[in-house]
Amino acid sequence: MTDNTVKPADPTALSADAQAPRVEQESRWTTAMRAFRTAPLTAWFGMIVILLYILVAIFAPALAPFGEREIVADAFEIPDDTYLLGTDQLGRDMLSRMIYAARNTVGIALITTILSFLLGSFLGMMAAVMGGWTDNILSRIVDVLMSIPQLIFALLLLTIVGANVVNMILVIALLDSTRVYRLMRAVGMNIVVMDYVEAAKLRGEGLVWLIRKEILPNAMAPLIAEFGLRFCFVFLTIAALSFLGLGIQPPTADWGTMVRDNAQLITFGEIIPLYPAAAIALLTVAVNFVVDWMLHRSSGLKE
Amino acid sequence: MHPIAKMALQRLALGVFTLFVVSIIIAGAVEFLPGDLAQEILGQSATPEAVAAFRAEVGLDKPPVERYFSWLGGVAQGDFGVSLATKRPISDLIAARLGNTLFLAGFAALIAVPLAVTLGMLAALYRNSWFDRLVNVSTLSSISFPEFFVAYVLILFLSVGYGFDARWVLAVLGLLLLVEGGGAVKSALKDSGRFSFIGAIVGVLGLALVVNAVFSWWTYQVEPVQAFPSISNISPNTPFGERVYRSFLPALTLTLVVTAHMMRMTRASIINLMASPYIEMARLKGMSPGRIIFKHALPNALAPIINVIAINLAYLITGVVVVEVVFVYPGLGQLLVDSVSKRDITVVQGCCLIFAATYILLNLTADILAIATNPRLLHPK
């Protein structure tokens, strides 16, 4: 309908318009390629490491020499040709558990982050679009939830509902969604006041259309960077809770729990408990490097 | 009344109100969330009579509102009730441990704050130099490390005698200097056709460091270090010097974790400030860099820096939980974790309230200090 009312003065302008989407897509592709080419070393390092982790997580059963819960030898065997990283406190192969943990730990962190994002960005968007009472009530609830340190609050909630994986996922997703809410609301607020959103509203577009077609596409860049940051944070929180014995429960292989179970070895000068801890550290470093590069690129105009 | 005093009072009232709401959440979470605590603590096989007796003993049979206000009244007088697991008064459990935790956090803050602020400012001033890049990469990495990773690495190198090979550090530093010096020489030649002596000296120094490290790996082994205890057992009558010595490793862990955060945020806020028009004006007038920083930038940088410090001290609170568990340090965090696994809800509530109060207090102090150093914040736009 809008097409009929707006008549271009110049027919050539129309043809240029018609070609615009294709041209823009090509240029977007080339910008992406250029961005990859000019990416700093740290970002490349991060992307390669993340890819490796994904591959290990997907092909865990094929890569691991032994089963996840299989007891193959005596407890705390030193590394040799069969058990490349030795065995753990029950005699399970350390390397196999490390590989399976890539699947469990990263998978659980990813599920939690996605949940937290769905909840946080949905509510944040509602607050931005609806404003008024909805915004006020939601924001006050979030303020109160954020006035207790996150890990402490998580510990309190886990005491009440009981410490297990499902509860941990729900509790962390809920607490972390407050941060996503803040960002989504702030970003959304800036977009809602734009003229094109106003125009869409005047055209009589519904709420869902407004969010899907006008706001979300423009909020994507900060949201993606935030997803990386939140993933790191959630991943570290889950690792900390598992390390404290309140997160992912045995016999599921998980890096945080593995550090806790084998920690006594460190007093004998063995570095084995450090391997799972280093696996956690390496992935968060990698994600942070990539996010840092993305943030730097998106703020590049300001500097 | 002085406007700042008035503002401080307002913030204080707001803080007390927040604390009140937080206490309602901490007490009310038990009611709203699913799960019957009495049943779960006593086990599935407990008889209904036993569960009822337990409820009466703990006071779970009274209506929630009455229970909340009697709890709050007790807390206001320093009485947190009794532990469900040990039946001991919680105030006794908390008292000594709170002091220990504050000591540890204070110790860490004392090292971390000056270190982080100085390094952050340097990184901001020498932006995009190799120092800045090194700082950026290393702080980004250490932010990403879980606290227990940092803790165990420190234990390995400084406590159990794994043998820390400082030559690695020297070799990496040498390599960096070599690349940097070489780059300087190259770009000077390309830009102005002149030979950069400083670049050459830096490069040769780097090369010397690398060569030295490589040769010394053939010739001798390092002595293992067993300088600090890996378990910080502290009792109320431990003398001060001993206390510092025994809590050195946990404090160092916390320092490393917090410094990275604090430094990055200091750097960012100073860079932000240095980009503002009045600094550019001062620079265009030909003012010396030192004068720009101390006369123009610093007074306005105080507010953001205070904020950064407060945020990170608040971050110390959560960091302390994991670090205390690693080092078996008798603090509040350790008590909290033990109580969570025993599902000793009354103790958990007490600990949470203290942690939350500290957190709110820190943020409040930061707010007030920031406004006191920058009166413009009294009049928000």
Image (spheres, coloured by chain):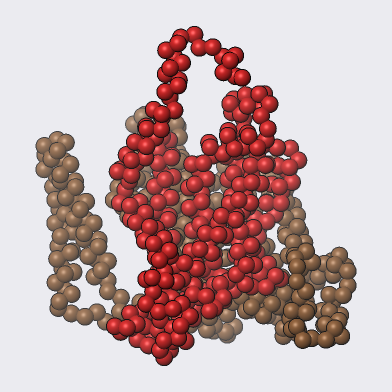
* Chain B tint as drawn: brown
In this image, B367 relative to B37: left or right?
left
Above or below: residue A96 compared with residue B106: below
Q: Where in the figure is residue B79, as x and y percent of width and height? A: 77, 74
Residue A151 to residue B374: above or below: below
| In the rendered image, the vertical position of residue A126 relative to residue A192, given as above or below | below
Quarter-of-image position of residue B285:
top left
Q: Which chain corresponds to the colour red?
A: A
Q: Quadrant for the C terminus of chain B, please.
A: top right
Position of A177 relative to A67 (above/below)? above
Q: Position of residue A61 (x, y in %)?
A: 42, 71
Q: Is residue B108 visible?
A: no
The image shows a total of numbered marks equal to: 0
Image coordinates of residue A93 in percent, x first then y, are: 40, 81
Which residue is at the front of the view, A112 or B362?
Answer: A112
Q: Closest to the observer: B347 or B60?
A: B60
Q: Residue furthest bottom?
A: A74
Q: Position of residue A139 (x, y in %)?
A: 69, 47
Q: Nearer the viewer, residue A72 or A218?
A: A72
Residue drawn where x is 35% and y is 51% of the image: A43
